[in-house]
Image (cartoon, rainbow, N blue to C red):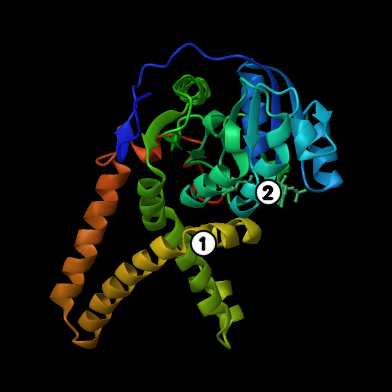
């Protein structure tokens, strides 16, 4: 893997799939559970040891066959693993990495799946010390608005992009291994800096989630909200789908990337002002032009004009409108 330039599209030809003896998953929810199931389905791992905050989640992960062994702590989930996945809300990344550091094996590959990268990398620098070179930060652009291990699936990552943001200190062999692993799960891998990642995902994910939360709240705060909601159709369903996302996960994401989200909010306010000015002036021509431009860009995006592969052609990343929420 090359040194991270602001944005690099990595090679498309997958390397040989890496195989692992033991995966330690810390955070057995949607993302961690799906990763474990995907590795098992691909025959890339012998044994999965999991840890979750609550005993109920851990027991459920075991019952569902997501993990083989329940660990009583994050530390013991990492112990003996040659692959460790940290899949907790991003604000818990630092404490998790600090907890596991003493028992990370000398050759183990450690990854996360957090939706923000600047904060995760900063936390890793603080927590991992001599193990920093083994950490390959990752963000799979896949998911659902429904959190929890019961929604995990083996094919969640198939056809999706995975962004890797390796550090200058990252062991190049482990970065290669991480890339080959995600490719073996059917993902397309891109490498970029944490800063480039956070700027891009503030625009295409974090602000859109904030707008969906705000739109639902704005409606719910009105006296006739119940009537309005009862009349809502597909437009409301599609626009607000991601407002059903997990509160803990999204609190952490928005706080972690607050500066970039505020920048995007300013762009959005300016665009809203432009639309409102056309409405105030009764300017049908301008209003039509504004809508036509947005419609054209959205259509081009869905046709793959901005990506190596069309974003709408890769289920389950962008599967039925009611089920997925790539972050
Ligand atoms: P999730 O289904 O709620 O799973 C989170 C897991 O972390 C649960 O097992 C939870 O345990 C555990 N956990 C929560 N707080 C913890 C803490 N303080 N210490 C240790 N474990 C803790 O959430 P998810 O959707 O998988 O999200 C996990 C990560 O993936 C987040 O960083 C998110 O940014 C990233 N991500 C999510 C998506 C998506 O669409 N969901 C997409 C891309 C990236 P309990 O169940 O016992 O509470």
Task: Specify few, some or many for label 2: CA neighbours under 10 Å numbering under 14, 14-19, or 20 or more.
Answer: some
Indicate which disc, 2 or 1, sits on the residue closer to the N terminus.
2
Vertical placement of 299 versus 230: above or below?
A: above
| Secondary structure under the numbered disc 2 in the rendered image | helix
Which residue extends farthest top? 16
Q: Residue at x 51, y 48 (%)?
A: 122
Which residue is tagged 2? Answer: 95
Which residue is tagged 1? Answer: 254
Horizontal and vertical percent position of residue 59:
85, 38
Tell me, yes or no, whether the two marked residues, 2 and 1, touch with CB atoms within 8 Å: no
Which residue extends farthest left? 285
Horizontal and vertical percent position of residue 251:
59, 62
Q: Residue at x 74, y 22 (%)?
A: 80
Task: Specify few, some or many for label 1: CA neighbours under 10 Å numbering under 14, 14-19, or 20 or more.
Answer: many
**Does any atom of ligand 1 lie closer than 8 Å to the CB of label 1?**
no
**Does any atom of ligand 1 lie closer than 8 Å to the CB of label 2?**
yes
Horizontal and vertical percent position of residue 100:
71, 37
Q: Residue at x 17, y 77 (%)?
A: 284
Of the pair 317 and 161, the residue shown nearer to us: 161
- Image quarter (top left, top right, bottom left or bottom right) of the N terminus: top left
| Secondary structure under the numbered disc 1 in the rendered image | helix
Vertical placement of 146 versus 314: above or below?
A: below
């Amino acid at each position: 893997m090359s040194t991270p330039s602001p944005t690099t599209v990595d090679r498309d030809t997958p390397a040989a799939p890496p195989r692992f003896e033991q995966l330690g998953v810390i955070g057995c929810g949607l993302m961690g559970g799906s990763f474990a199931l995907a590795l098992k389905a691909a025959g890339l791992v012998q044994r999965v040891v999991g840890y979750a905050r609550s005993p109920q989640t851990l027991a459920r992960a075991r019952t569902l066959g997501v993990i083989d062994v329940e660990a009583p702590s994050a530390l013991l989930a990492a112990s003996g693993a040659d692959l460790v996945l940290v899949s907790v809300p991003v604000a818990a990344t630092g404490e998790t990495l600090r907890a596991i550091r003493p028992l990370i094996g000398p050759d183990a590959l450690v990854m996360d799946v957090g939706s923000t990268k600047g904060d995760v990398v900063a936390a890793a620098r603080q927590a991992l010390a001599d193990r920093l070179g083994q950490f390959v930060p990752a963000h799979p652009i896949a998911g659902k608005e429904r959190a929890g291990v019961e929604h995990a699936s083996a094919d969640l990552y198939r056809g999706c992009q995975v962004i890797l943001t390796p550090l200058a200190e990252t062991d190049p062999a482990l970065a290669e291994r991480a890339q080959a692993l995600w490719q073996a799960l059917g993902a397309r891998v891109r490498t970029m800096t944490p800063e480039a990642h956070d700027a891009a995902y503030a625009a295409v994910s974090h602000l859109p989630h904030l707008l969906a939360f705000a739109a639902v709240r704005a409606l719910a705060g009105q006296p006739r909200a119940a009537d309005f909601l009862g009349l809502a159709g597909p437009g409301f369903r599609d626009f607000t789908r991601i407002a059903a996302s997990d509160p803990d996960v999204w609190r952490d994401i928005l706080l972690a990337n607050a500066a970039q989200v505020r920048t995007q909010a300013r762009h959005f306010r300016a665009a809203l002002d432009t639309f409102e000015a056309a409405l105030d002036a009764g300017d049908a021509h301008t209003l039509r032009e504004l809508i036509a431009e947005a419609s054209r860009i959205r259509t081009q995006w869905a046709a793959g004009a901005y990506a190596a592969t069309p974003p709408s052609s890769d289920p389950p990343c962008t599967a039925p409108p009611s089920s997925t929420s790539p972050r």
